[in-house]
Image (spheres, grey):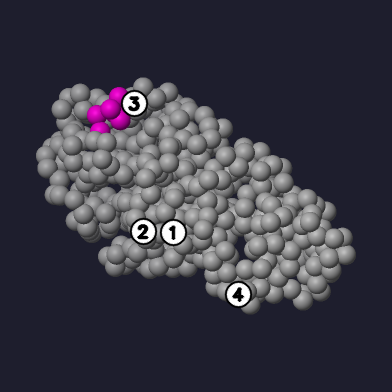
Amino acid sequence: MSFTKLGLMPALLANLKHLEYQQPTPVQQQAIAPILAGKDILAAAQTGTGKTAAFTLPTLQLLLTQGEKVTSNCVRALVLVPTRELAEQVHESIRTYLHELPLRTAVAYGGVSINPQMMNLRRGVDVLVATPGRLLDLYQQNAVRFNQMQILVLDEADRMLDLGFAEELNALFSLMPRQRQTLLFSATFSGPIRTLAGKLLNDPVRVDVTPKHSAAETVKQYLLVVDKKDKTDLLLHLLASRQWGQVLVFVRTRKGAESLSKKLLAAKVSSDAIHGDKTQPARLRALHDFKAGRIQVLVATDVAARGLDIEQLPHVVNFDLPTIAQDYVHRIGRTGRAGLTGEAISLVSADELDELIAIEELMGIHLQRFDEPDFYAEHRLPETVLGVGSIKKPKKPKKNKAAAAGNIHLGDAFNADSKPQVVAIRQVPRLAVPGRHKPKPSNAKPR
Ligand code: AMP
């Protein structure tokens, strides 16, 4: 996948070309389009994944294309970081990505004189990178105002909390306009980070490039949010558009298995079902036909499918989530066997929230979620956070706002391997930033 597919404007693309960035890293692939669409982001990404460009590029584009000219002492986008070193680094990256585009930027952190920082803010800045303590000082001295703020970025949020910035952060949040876009980046998701996310983010898009591998590492698991009534059509669409071969589809009930298999047959997809109401010979025949490749889709209930050994099955679909979370583990174990890669795709509707929470808690992972274009769910699945369950009450469904407006298109997201370790990362060629002073190094908590 290329940067052009992410919706970035030509001027920024030209800068990336100049930097010789060939293709977006996974976090960039997942975060840039939703940010451009105005969504809040909750991202698990560590340093070295390309996260700075992931939040900077769309932020710059939004500032260049939307909002009013900045007025004195105001900021339009604020990037909060834990340390002065990171503040410098992020600011330098922002300057690099911006190159000669017409936005004003500044950096502010403690341990150095506050006066030059106050001077820099006097005309207002489009992007300010700051540590929380110094920013609060600047606010208390009337050097900075937040009434024009469009975007708030928390970079390395976990480190900010670890360094004891919770109080300063809370004070700052209370001063900021509620109507804004918030992007939260953190390497880890401890309880306090989840609480912070629940408080600050509005229906965020989850971006996760550091999954915990509690399931088979070779199985890519994700879910598609879909309205219950559209599940059969979505399955047919996936079979055709992804050109899947054989697929094992799990459903919750015997009746559901029979009914889905019939619908697939009616749509000219070769299919059979195995469930407890079928005689043993009928079940064996269905399994035999599936193994011999005579049928494309085998629809199964959990009990009937236990212990099935089907080799080299690339796709397992959870048409319904199981009521017993442990069954999910058995289901996805049907793919990704013997070192081969596989995908486990769950079609999840809003009424399956409790089952989803139980599965995520059991597995210790947050399943990445996507919308399939043309199947955007009217009934939204509330966001979940590990250890907390649902953090948001279901909102009134929005009328068909295109999936592109927020979530990621599946095909794009998985074009590249989403493991951060395998991403080729290059250093940004540093451009000179005129008039910037070097901070005194210090290990102390910056103000
Ligand atoms: P970060 O994780 O933001 O600290 O970025 C780590 C390094 O990756 C920085 O030196 C970036 O210049 C570099 N980088 C970020 N995105 C890309 C990309 N798409 N292609 C090549 N290098 C990149």
Q: Quadrant of residue 84?
A: top left
* Quadrant of residue 279 within the rendered picture: bottom right
Amino acid bearing label 3: Asn
Of marks 2 and 3, the one in the foreground: 2
* Front disc: 3 or 1: 1
Q: Secondary structure at mark 2?
A: loop
- Per the rendering, the mark at residue 376 is 1
**Which mark's residue is nearer the viewer, 4 or 3?**
4
- In the rendered image, residue 429, in percent from the top left (x then y), is placed at 39, 57
Question: In what element is the residue under mark 4?
Answer: loop
Q: Which residue is mark 4?
A: 267
Q: Position of residue 184 (x, y in %)?
A: 41, 41
What is the chief secondary structure element of the magenta stretch?
helix
Query: Which residue is pictured at 80% across the width and 63% down the height?
Result: 310
- CA gap, disc 4 to disc 1? 22 Å
Residue type marked 4 = Ala
Q: Sequence order check: which comes first, mark 2 or mark 1?
A: 1
Between the C-alphas of marks 3 and 1, the distance is: 35 Å
Measured in 3D between alpha carbons, the distance from the residue under mark 2 to the one under mark 1, in whole angstroms, is: 7 Å
**Residue ID for mark 2:** 400
Q: Is residue 408 visible?
A: no
Asked which secondary structure carries label 1, the reply is loop
Q: Which mark is residue 170?
A: 3
Going from the N terminus, do you reach mark 2 or mark 4 first? 4
Q: Does the Cβ of the disc 2 residue fall within 8 Å of ligand 1?
A: no
**Left or right relative to 161: residue 439:** left
x%, y% of residue 195? 45, 30
* Nearer to the camera, 239 or 59: 239
Does the magenta segment cover residue 175?
yes
Tell me the kind of residue under disc 1. Tyr
